[in-house]
Image (tube, rainbow, N blue to C red):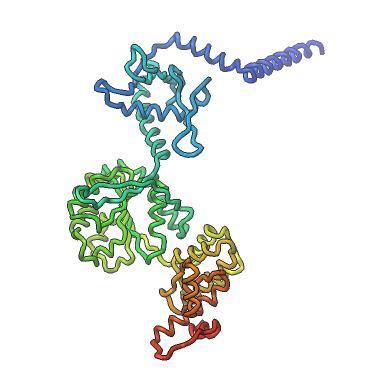
Amino acid sequence: MKILLVPILLLFVILSLLFLLRVLLFKTGLIYITKKWWRSIEDCFHVYQFFKVPEFNENMQKNHLYRKVSIYLSSIASIEDSDFTNLFTGKKPHDIVLHLDPNQVIDDYFLGARVSWINQEKNDTNRCRTFVLKIRRTDKRKILRPYLQHIHITSDELEQKKKDVKLYINNDSPGQSGHWRSVPFKHPSTFDTIAMESDLKNKLKSDLESFLKAKHYYHRLGRAWKRSYLLYGPSGTGKSSFVAAIANFLGYDVYDIDLSRVLDDSGMKMLLLQTTCKSVILIEDLDRFFMDKSTRVSLSGILNFMDGALNSCCADERIMVYTMNCKDHADPAILRPGRVDVHIHFPLCDFSAFKTLAHNYLGVKDHKLFPQVEEFFQTGASLSAAEIGELMIANRNSPSRALKSVVAALQTDGDRRGSLNIRRQWTDNSSRKSTDDSGEQSGVFSKEGVNATKDIRKLYGLLRLKSRKKSESFDRTPDSKAGQSCGL
């Protein structure tokens, strides 16, 4: 019995010592000192090579690789685990950026190999700041080129995420044709906020993500790395918001071309030449261009802009977007594949889009009035997203009142689609007085914002009376009579 107790006791003592050693190493920080000692010993048995990345080249021009390495090193996890580092505020609010201290050394791991970076500051021997890459000679052939490519790709992705998106508009000032002016692009639209069918939304996001990864595929086919979208549908259905959602999703700048400001076909080419990669190039209301005979850009100029030789050379990594209210009368040459890759119809709102708007504008996912709204949509009544959105904004403090306003608008739409004017008009006291004297409301919303249904009936009752061109004059019509004349 005593013989068995001795090994058990010995095993218990060994396990206790190992546990205490583990606690001592990890709780007191001795593990980090041990690792440093082990690396120092290990370095004695390896031969290293050093590669310098100076901030400037011999001609004192900026070395872009230095900037990419700086961005990359600021993002790796080992800089957070280092003994010390510098903290700076970034461009965006609450953004913290980590930077190496002079002569600080940090480690990085790639394909199982350890490399080290040294941040050398400007001194008597170094004319400029320099990053020094320390790599084992045995690992150089295996990882050096892939590692530098990895730094390029990672830094580009980080720059794209941190980049401030801009909106560019073409300038029509004399002597400055083809130049762009830019403003910060602050449009808040995203794929989560636009009113669109979920399946279509997911397909479009997948299409954009596939485009981002298809550079080598497009070049292998001998095609420019670009994607073209045609957005068509009535005004107020969300085409511009969709363009903003694309820009925010990709982090691309937006170049908005106003054809009325372009001097000629050569001006269109200059505009394209001066766009940058990773951008969305937008031409809105392209169908109006065909009806406007005063424009100085020809149809041939538009076609060459969309898919000409210059486009093939200068349109890499660009999204081309064109919008129309109706594509039925558009020239078939514009709509052919190659010039337009994807056609997206933006119809008036259906019930699914209405629920998205109700959630975004009112924070409502379900309501007792939803079945009534759905019934109106099923009977053919419809409104644009802009019209419904304005009703909800005006009554955002009361979701029930907002939904009742939508119901009333859909009722009116059943009688006369297209004449509904859903916008709140703010007027001074004198204009209110003149409106009261004439017996007509200036918009759907009165001063108190109550009983929108009666206001709509009254307004459109008067519109129908005018459209019938009755010769007799009329006095103020009571709400109930106006409702009867509207057929409500």
Residue at image location 44% in from the left, 64% down from the top: 386
Quarter location, residue 62: top left
Residue 50 position (above or below residue 250): above
Query: In this view of the protein, which residue sits in the foreground, 26 or 431?
Result: 431
Residue at image coords 39%, 63%: 346
Kindly tell me whether residue 221 is visible in this rendering.
no
- The percent position of residue 388, horizontal first and vertical second, equals 48, 66
Q: Is residue 280 left or right of residue 87?
A: left
Q: Is residue 450 above or below residue 225?
A: below
Q: Position of residue 189 (x, y in %)?
A: 44, 53
Q: Quadrant of residue 276?
A: top left
Asked whether 361 or 474 is in front, the reply is 474
| Residue 237 against residue 67 in the figure, above or below | below
Q: Quadrant of the N terminus?
A: top right
Q: At x 44% / y 89%, what residue is drawn?
A: 473
Residue farthest to the front, as pictured: 430
| Residue 330 at x, y percent in the picture | 26, 65
| Percent of width and height locating residue 392 | 52, 64
Identify which residue is drawn at 42% across, 75% down.
417
Looking at the image, which is closer to me, 322 or 454?
Answer: 454
Left or right: residue 423 versus residue 306 is: right
**Against 264, is 89 above or below?**
above
Asked if residue 65 can be seen in this view, the reply is yes
Q: Is residue 56 left or right of residue 101?
A: left
